[in-house]
Image (cartoon, rainbow, N blue to C red):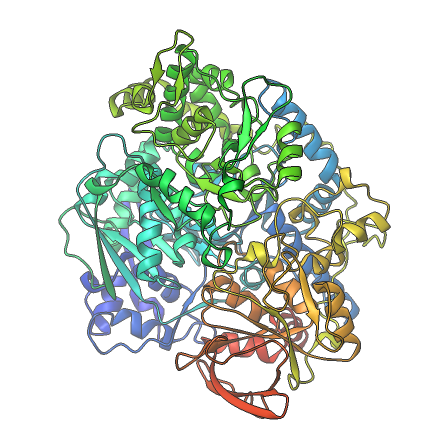
Amino acid sequence: MDKKIYLKSFSSGGQDYYYYSLEELVQDHGGNMKYLPYSLRVILESSIRNFDDHKITEKHIEPLAGWGTGEEKIEEIAFKPHRILFHDTTGVPALVDMALLRDYAKDHGTDTDRVNPVIPIDLVIDHSLIVDASANQLAIEMNETREFERNKERFQFLKWAQNNFDNFRVFPPSSGIMHQINLEYISEVVRIQKEEDKSIVYPDSLVGADSHTTMINGLGIVGYGVGGIEAEAAMLGESLYLGDPKVVGVKLAGKLPEGSTATDLALTVTHLLRKHDVVGKIVEFFGEGVDSLTVFDRSTISNMAPEYGATMSYFPVDEETLEYLETIGKDKETIEFIRNYYCEQGLFRQAGAETPIYSELVELDLSDITSSISGPKRPQDKVDIKEVKDDFNHLVKAPVGEGGYGLDQSQLDRKVAIPSSDKEHLETGSIVLASITSCTNTSNPDVLISAGILAKKAFEKGLEVPSYIKTSFTPGSKVVTEYMKKSGLQESMNALGFDIAGYGCATCIGNSGDLLPEPDRIVDEEDLVVSSILSGNRNFEGRVHPKIKANYLASPPLVVAYALAGKIDIDFESEPIGVEPGGKEIYLRDLWATSKEVEQIKKSAIDPEMFLKSYGDIMTRNERWNSLTPVDSNTYSWDPESTYIQKPPFLDEDLKAESLEESKILLMLGDSVTTDHISPSGRIKVDGSAGRHLIEKGISPREFNSYPSRRGNYLVMERAAFANVRVRNRLVPDREGGFTKYLPTGETMEIFEAAKRYAQDDTPLTIIAGKEYGTGSSRDWAAKGTMLLGVKTVIAESFERIHRSNLICMGVLPLQFQDGKTQETLNIAGDETFYFENELEALHPGKVITVKMKREDTVESFRVKVRLDNHAEVTYYKHGGILPYIANTMMSE
């Protein structure tokens, strides 16, 4: 196929530009553009523009071009993004792997400059901030100073990478959160590149080594999360592949009612689409309801795509997109150019246009959205505000095996006095942590202004947040600070303890810091089921804070409201949120902001200059970062004494699996095991394998930092695998945390210790799991840690897309139970041995094989599907993972 025949021109601003015409491509393949979902149009454009008949072939183009005709048979689609986005805790291990590849190239006599990103890479340092200090005006300076002290070695490594890799830039600490910076600054919507003498125009696109990269879908940009390992392949020019793309069309009708927020809508969509099962599918929104949503609202919804399992959550470019670009300071000529190109290419969503053909349809009336929160353990578990009290009281008494906490009435009735207060106490359901945090909501001025108005009304009525609650506010960009201060609302937020504590993900990723001293001690001693409330996107067990068992996601105004109430089990309709000094009861309805109040402040407090000013010096304003002067060396000088950066063993020959035969079970896990369970975020346990290793290296617990900060050191991270305090391994049903049974002796021990013993006998290991294995973050260490433990196979009822891909990229084989079989129906006890014999020969996408399971003197067989879903994944697995594949390819060229 000659792609140049599809190269067409258009004029804008008196200049000629060129583009690859989708309309003509689709017509040539017997299709019709009106049938093709907008998200697939962008992917198809990338495929034709990057067509090379090698990594992207006609088989990747023809089925998409014929979408909706009934003739298309799609095995996989290929995608080459324009750019890649990292944060520091995914970027550091990816760059460590790149440094490893440079060493490999040097050792094998190959030019080290061949290991260089071939497409633009942006890395935002936003995952290092820990909320050590809060609720005071000095908190931001104290936290940022401490952040740099803890992470200087990591930052030095990133500075080395910035100085030595092409197409790579780093946004310094305290810049903001990656997804908000991506939305407000990095994204261009269109890109232009020179091809011979022509200026080729194409849509901006990206992948990010963070699952919430989908936030950019709200701006009409195709982008989704991949594992850091897969991102490395894209960095080096590999195409990315998705299996048969099912596109779920979500038809929105009506408008949000007064009192409901974009967060309420996002939580509702999460609940609805998780129930519908959109795992691994593309979600695209259409219908007249889309017109009523701002880009801020759309991005709030799109951000949550990984929480309902979707690959993307796409809103096409339309008039609202252009209005947003004007808001953030794009000039009129640029906006008009974007309009011209998107209309010319058939990518612009016009009101009243014919609806594309979708694989599945879901409908949602926005007028039905009510105020809600999600929790206490999963983001998809939405609870209407009116039902929170009853739902929580039910869960605390429900058995642990049914998702509850298993408390009896005597435990529920306990009230523990706080020594420093003569009127406050802690009990089941008390909130001890309240945080306005994360990209999901701090990018949306409507909900932040609503929170500020609620805080202002509460402060004026003399209400206070109880002294036992740790409060914090960590915005996603400096723009938030500007409009909150300009509106005067930040002063009221400060009065309630929501002072700005820094710019980063913070509490949302478990960097919440210590609880206040008295609650911390009481929760420990009394083992109370207390709660957190945060405006984040994840509340998996053990993530927000290891001592808080019930964690809820909410809009920023509800975070303030629950903080004022001091407890999660309150019915805001019938119970007061507080009492004025004069004795008058105050209800939530007395404080809630109206849409008119929000709009008035938004209009007066936000202007394009604010965005231009905030981002004008973003790369140069951090003096601490500027002062770093790394050694200029083409390869990295590994320090064997470093506790942050170590040369990983991923290209060592002895890591490759010789055989999977006689595999033993390392863990038996239930449903919804997250990447937080597999590779924990947050603080490092002093009494765990990772903590003991650091102590042996002379690191005091105060200097441990967090698990994510240590991801450049495999010696820490392999010991952290499955070390989450809430992991429940059915091999040791009486223990919680990172423990297992070492089967040869029957001893209970830490998982890392058991894995070491199995390795001494060359015993391959298997993990057995239930549904939705690997939900959550696109955390490559969830796969890397699994592999370093010696796990060769994971057999589960279903997998989340990114973690399944990461396992393959690390040479671990994902297998999926078939024919309705599960660990329960097969009565797997945990002491079985598994045999694969010759079943893994001649692998191909979707192959179904038979596994033999031996227990005592009997052998039982069951079928599993090999979850290698495309030919690229088969190739990576056969090489032992993507890094060996890249290394071997590099040497053979």
When asked about the image quadrant of residue 668, the answer is bottom right
- Asked whether 180 or 437 is in front, the reply is 437
Above or below for 241 versus 858: above
Q: Residue at x 44, y 55 (%)?
A: 224
Instruction: Pick out the residue farthest to the front.
Output: 410
Residue 85 visible? The answer is: yes
- Asked whether 687 or 123 is in front, the reply is 687
Q: Is residue 314 left or right of residue 466?
A: left
**Residue 108: image x %, image y %?**
76, 72
- Asked whether 240 or 163 is in front, the reply is 240
Above or below for 522 versus 797: above
Residue 634 visible? The answer is: no
Above or below for 414 versus 353: above
Above or below for 153 versus 668: above
**Residue 83: image x %, image y %?**
49, 53
**Residue 469: image x %, image y %?**
55, 27
Report the quarter where the C terminus lies: bottom right
Q: Residue at x 37, y 46 (%)?
A: 189
